[in-house]
Amino acid sequence: MGMNDERNEERDATEGAVSRRTVLKGTTAAGVAGGLLPGQASGHPKPRTITVKTLTVPARYRFTVSGEVAKRPSAGTSDEIRGHRTVLGRIDTKGELDEFAFSGEITSFETLKGDVDVVVDGKAVEEKRAKKAKERALPNAITIRAEGEDVSYRFRVTGRVRKGPTADGGDSVDGTTVSGAVGGRGTDDYRYSGSLVFDSTEGPLTVTLELDQ
């Protein structure tokens, strides 16, 4: 074999090695590209849905699931998801609705302001269950009854407070402070959390407390 033949054979062997390395490199890249992305295997399916529709505006609500939760297209930009499990939602337009996909179970639902309808997996949450959930969120109740004359009152709570069915438009809730008036045989009622302190009353009243009901 001549010197030129030896050089040609060596060049062919080298080119073959380069070609094989190139193929192997391409195969490795293809394997990575075709493999699972980080976290893909552990992705949590969200086959269930919850829809929140406002009855009064503005409305604020909060709920937590045992799995994970994600917004669907109808959810508002102001809705916030914390820790993949808890939603802080708000609706400012009457008739508007928010929808979310989730996995697991709904472990808690709390209406923070206003009134909402809740539909889970296409089925409306029973009114009694929704009422019980609200009462658990605000476990204490106070009823203020007049003794004949019109009497103004004012009290504060350390948690949250909202009007009950008998409190009317003349009674107001400003944060944690309630100001109202009751007369004749009328009553005002509220639900609240935490402790309660009366700042003032301008006459005789009968006050009934129901704690942790």
Image (cartoon, grey):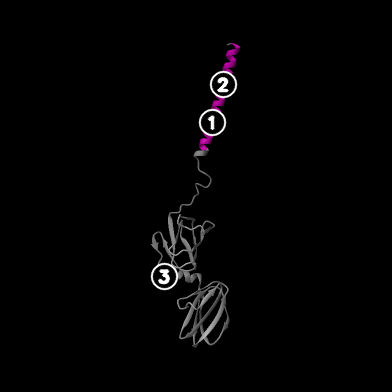
Task: Tell me, for residue 128, which label it has, or none.
Answer: 3
Please state which amino acid type lies under the numbered disc 1: Leu
Q: Is residue 114 found inside the magenta-colored segment of the image?
A: no
Mark 3 → mark 1, Cα distance in angstroms: 66 Å
Q: Which residue is mark 2?
A: 13
Lower position in the chain sequence, tag 3 or tag 1: 1
SS for callout 3? helix
In the rendered view of the protein, which quadrant contains the N terminus? top right
Residue at point 58%, 19% (across, down):
11
Q: Nearer the viewer, residue 73 or 136?
A: 73
- Image height check: is 102 above or below 212? above
Residue ranking furthest to the top: 2
Q: Residues within 10 Å of mark 2 (few under 14, many from 20)?
A: few
Mark 3 → mark 2, Cα distance in angstroms: 82 Å
Lower position in the chain sequence, tag 2 or tag 1: 2
Which quadrant of the structure image shows residue 185?
Answer: bottom left
Task: Look at the image and give the residue range highlighted in magenta.
Answer: 2-31
Q: Is residue 9 found inside the magenta-colored segment of the image?
A: yes
Q: Is residue 124 left or right of residue 3?
A: left
SS for callout 2? helix
Lower position in the chain sequence, tag 3 or tag 2: 2
Residue 38: x and y in percent read: 53, 45
